[in-house]
Image: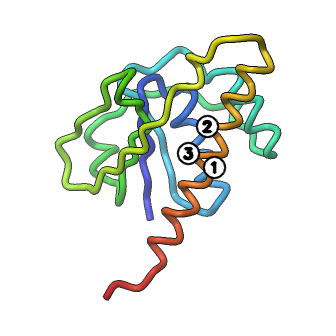
């Protein structure tokens, strides 16, 4: 199963989702509608805690060619805070509606905890996605 994770900046949620999905055996990629210059340092740090290195990754823009090669597209945009991508493809699109941890406020520990919470939630949802894809069709 090929999965594309899309968020706005491709600097936090979708990068974490791609890396977590790959660590769980999925063929995954990620992209953003308005990519940032670099992956968020707290995303790198939180995944490093999980034994995953994304320090070499770079944000990239979502494009139709990439999207059409996927079996599933997962948007991670928080609909109350940002506009999610609308891709004209015949690929199932799932919306996970997760807040951007890069927008978290507070001290360093509070912001790191926000990244941990989002990473854990993404990992939980990926596991559910994997389990549901392995169930036989009726």
- Disc 3 crowd rating (10 Å Cα; few below 14, some 14-19, many 20+) is many
Q: Quadrant of the N terminus?
A: bottom left
The location of residue 122, given as percent across then percent down, is 57, 46
The location of residue 81, given as percent across then percent down, is 39, 21
Is residue 3 or residue 116 the one in the foreground? Answer: 116
Is residue 135 or residue 3 the one in the foreground? Answer: 135
State the residue at coordinates (46%, 22%). 9
Q: Which residue is mark 1?
A: 20
The location of residue 129, given as percent across then percent down, is 49, 62
Q: Mark 1–mark 3 contact, CB under 8 Å?
A: yes
- Left or right of 86? Residue 116 is right
Q: Secondary structure at mark 1?
A: helix
Q: Nearer the viewer, mark 3 or mark 2?
A: 2
- Disc 1 crowd rating (10 Å Cα; few below 14, some 14-19, many 20+) is many
Q: Which residue is mark 3?
A: 18
Q: Nearer the viewer, mark 2 or mark 1?
A: 2
Query: Which of pointers 3 and 2 lies earlier in the amino acid sequence?
Result: 3
Q: Secondary structure at mark 2?
A: helix
C-alpha separation, residue under disc 2 versus residue under disc 1: 12 Å
Q: Which residue is mark 2?
A: 118
Q: Secondary structure at mark 3?
A: helix
């Amino acid at each position: 199963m090929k999965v594309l994770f899309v968020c706005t900046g491709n600097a936090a949620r979708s990068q974490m989702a791609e890396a977590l999905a790959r660590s769980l055996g999925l063929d995954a990629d990620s992209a953003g509608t308005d990519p940032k210059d670099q992956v968020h340092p707290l995303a790198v740090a939180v995944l490093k805690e999980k034994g995953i290195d994304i320090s070499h990754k770079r944000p990239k823009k979502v494009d139709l060619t990439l999207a059409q090669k996927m079996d599933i597209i997962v948007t991670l945009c928080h609909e109350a805070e940002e506009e999610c991508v609308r891709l004209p493809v015949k690929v199932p699109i799932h919306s996970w509606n997760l807040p951007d941890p890069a927008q978290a406020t507070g001290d360093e520990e509070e912001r790191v905890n926000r990244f941990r919470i989002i990473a854990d939630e993404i990992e939980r949802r990926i596991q559910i996605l994997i389990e549901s894809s392995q169930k036989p069709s009726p």
